Image (cartoon, rainbow, N blue to C red):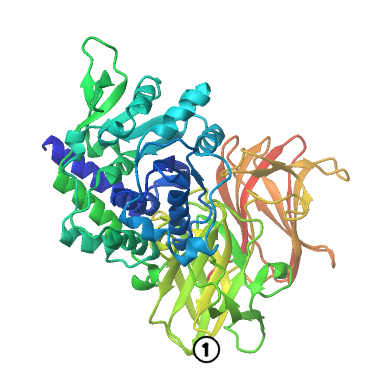
Amino acid sequence: MTGRHHILSKAIVSFFLLLTGGTSASDRQPILIDTDIGTGIDDAFALGLAFGSYELDVRGITTVGDDTHNRAMMMCRFLTVTGRRHTRVAAGAKPQSSRPITDQQKYYYHPDPIFNRTTKPEKQSAVEFLFARLKQQSGQVTVAALGPLTNLARLIETHGDATKLIRRIVLLEKNISLDVVAARKVLSSRVPLLVISEAASSNLQLDDARVTRVFSPGTPLTRQVETMYQMWDRHQPPLGEAFAVALCIDEQLARIERQAITVDDQGKLTKVAGSESNARVVTSVEPGEFANWYVTRMSSLVAPKDAPSRVIQDNTMPHRVHVAEDFDNDIERFWWMSGKPETELLPAGSKRACRGVLTHDFDDLLMQSRQMYSAVIFNPVPGPPMGRNTRLRFRYWLKGTDTIRVQIYSLTNGYHRQLVVKGLPQEKWQLATVDMTQARRPDGTGGPLGENERIDDIQFYIDPNAQILIDDVLLYDAGGKDQRQPFPRRILFTGIFDTGKQGQHWPGDFVLVPDAGNFWRAVQSVENPETGKPWIRLGLRGLRRVGPKTAVSFRYQVKGAKAIQVQLLNSKSGEVQTAMATELEPNRWSGKTVEFATTELTAIDELRFILPKDATLLLDDVLIFERAE
């Protein structure tokens, strides 16, 4: 395999992992972007890539070059219209290098920024903004310099310790001549530098056919890049700045050498013989291969409504159940945010379902928040973290439409993801499972739900003139290929303890232990003052209906016991059912399931684990469920 084909293969693998959920929330690279947007079109294509790439976490934007305020307002329009109001913008202070805004000035002279329809730039200068953001994530943040180095030189000059806060600066040789003095300060700063030589970037561009593919998704993000491209009104847009952003994702897109370099009076890089290297320099990249990489990535940002998902089959026991809601009782009713109880038109075995009512879309960033839908929405307090293979299982009844939009909010990232399912049967209860790793933001960005990512509202939307009923909602991590146990018939309670407060969300007698669970947190046994023996008493927050073939599964770490009692209890009636968990494996995380003959119990509100004297139990991932027939 040749070197350049190896580079392309690595890039394809990286992109495949992104699409299939191989990048978790914790893997995202924080970056700050310093841009002279409005001069040329290259920065617009770079910003499209930055916001379209899930691997990158854009922590803020600063503007550089003449009239930094108007550039900042252009960025505010771009961010607001593409649903990224949370990304803040700061303008560089005067004086700035001579770098006029050209034909894209019209992007600023628009009702959105002029009549306060967008966010506003920060009151801080770019330098103070950069310094504050760098301190928040010391040593982790890459700065992508897409224009003159004026702001960065001023940052280094004003805050000497900033050099220790920056992970690296990615910059282009072609921009050095715009402020040679600033460039020399940056190159001598000892900040890790990745410099794209002019020879490497000069041939990076898009032809008309590739431009058409970039804009083909027609999402808010690609439309804004297209808007600025139309104002530029030329052909073959350059991709040098987009390449700088791409290197923040994957440096294997280029050939890189360590060099000792300086800047001559014309702003050209020159090698310094016999000196210690002060930068890594991109010496070459294959233009056609990078253009294809860029186009493939941008053209894949298809809106979920234009790429419907399918109902999948999943009949094996979940690895972990994050959320369970069957609407049968009022224990969690404060979670219900849209919908009303339904007691007549029900699936077999159900006591109550939830009927959709009119509401606007909860996504106020990328959807039309004033448009009305019929929806069932609830909030799974206290916002559990996800696993690697998130699935959503639910029962539904539809009339007047065959389409459901399923939407979920990320507390971690501050945005909604959705998927759309079409061609669904109407006027009969159906069971559906969807793969939530396929969900994306409405503009196709955002990447898949990642491991450890916390979620909030679970939402089902349909046409406002149609009807929807929802029941038996389960959000869970799939069991995997090795799982042989069937999916439960019904789930009564899930206890994962990773978030929420003891008492309010997790009542009972135990100690919540951080960073000690099978996943995040666990509960630990305490002494029962009445018996003197250790136990864990879990309150179920109210009475829950019990059916035949009830079982309790849990993950445990036990010391000093080979067997423990597991009890289902109705504290109102005093009725109790006991089973033994035997052959426990000591001193390591293991899993166990115990079976109950629940003929004497119709409802329970407590689950107890009773240990021998001097034993200790850590407990996680508790599930009370009815076995499948």
Front position in the image: 367 or 624: 367
Front position in the image: 393 or 569: 393
Q: Residue at x 45, y 86 (%)?
A: 401
507 displayed left or right of 53: right
Residue placed furthest toward the left: 2
18 displayed left or right of 339: left
The picture quadrant where one finds residue 589 is: top right
Mark 1 neighbour class, 10 Å CA radius: few under 14, some 14 to 19, many 20 or more? few
Above or below: residue 18 compared with residue 544: above
Residue placed furthest toward the right: 530
| Image coordinates for residue 240, horizontal then vertical, percent | 25, 43
Above or below: residue 65 compared with residue 223: above
562 displayed left or right of 287: right
Label 1 amino acid?
Asn
Front position in the image: 211 or 456: 211
Q: Report which residue position mark 1 lands on.
A: 465
21 displayed left or right of 603: left
The picture quadrant where one finds residue 456 is: bottom right
| Image coordinates for residue 286, horizontal then vertical, percent | 15, 41
Label 1 sits on a secondary structure element that is: loop
Q: Residue at x 53, y 70 (%)?
A: 628
Residue 122 can be seen in this image: yes
| Image coordinates for residue 538, horizontal then vertical, percent | 74, 54
Front position in the image: 451 or 313: 451
Above or below: residue 19 compared with residue 218: above
Residue 489 can be seen in this image: no
Q: Residue at x 46, y 77 (%)?
A: 404
| Image coordinates for residue 454, horizontal then vertical, percent | 56, 53
Could you tell me how many numbered marks the image carries? 1
